[in-house]
Image (spheres, rainbow, N blue to C red):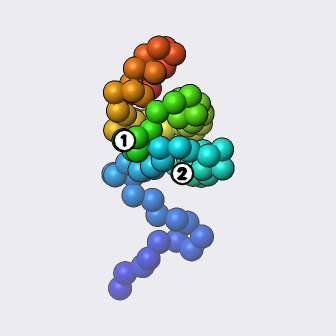
Amino acid sequence: MSSGPPAGHHRVDTSQPLVVTLPAAPTREEVARLCAGLAAAPPGEVRCELDRGAHGLAVVDALARIALEARRRGHRLRFDGAGPELTALLRLTGLDELL
């Protein structure tokens, strides 16, 4: 006889990182949704995949907001897929440690 997980408790696989995707032109609503997902997830590794065409100050703002929420919630955050334009802009703004 085997038993399942206790009622009312969710099982979360923490062996794999939580993966979120940031579109090339993120809206405030999309960023708020991603931040809410980070707030709801247990602390762990998070990989944020960036659309290859993502660049501009709206993306920098979104990355900063996501990084702040991840830090507040105890997540280890890694961004993947930044193109050369976004990398250069993050260096210019002093936020290249996000990558």
Decide: few, some or many residues near mark 1? Use Cα within 10 Å; few <14, some 14-19, many ≥20.
some
Q: In the picture, which quadrant includes the N terminus?
A: bottom left
At mark 1, the secondary structure is: loop
**Up-down relation of residue 24 to residue 16 (above or below):** above
Given residues 52 and 42, the one toward you in this image is 52
Q: Amino acid at mark 2?
A: Ala
Q: Amino acid at mark 1?
A: Arg
- In the rendered structure, the answer to whether residue 39 lies left or right of residue 15 reads right
Percent x, y for residue 91?
A: 43, 16
At x 51%, y 30%, the residue is 56
Given residues 41 and 52, the one toward you in this image is 52
Percent x, y for residue 38?
A: 55, 46
At x 36%, y 41%, the residue is 52
Q: Identify residue for label 2.
A: 41
At mark 2, the secondary structure is: loop
Q: Identify residue for label 1.
A: 52
Q: Is residue 35 visible?
A: no
**Up-down relation of residue 67 to residue 46 (above or below):** above
- Which one is closest to the eye, mark 1 or mark 2? 1
At x 40%, y 20%, the residue is 88
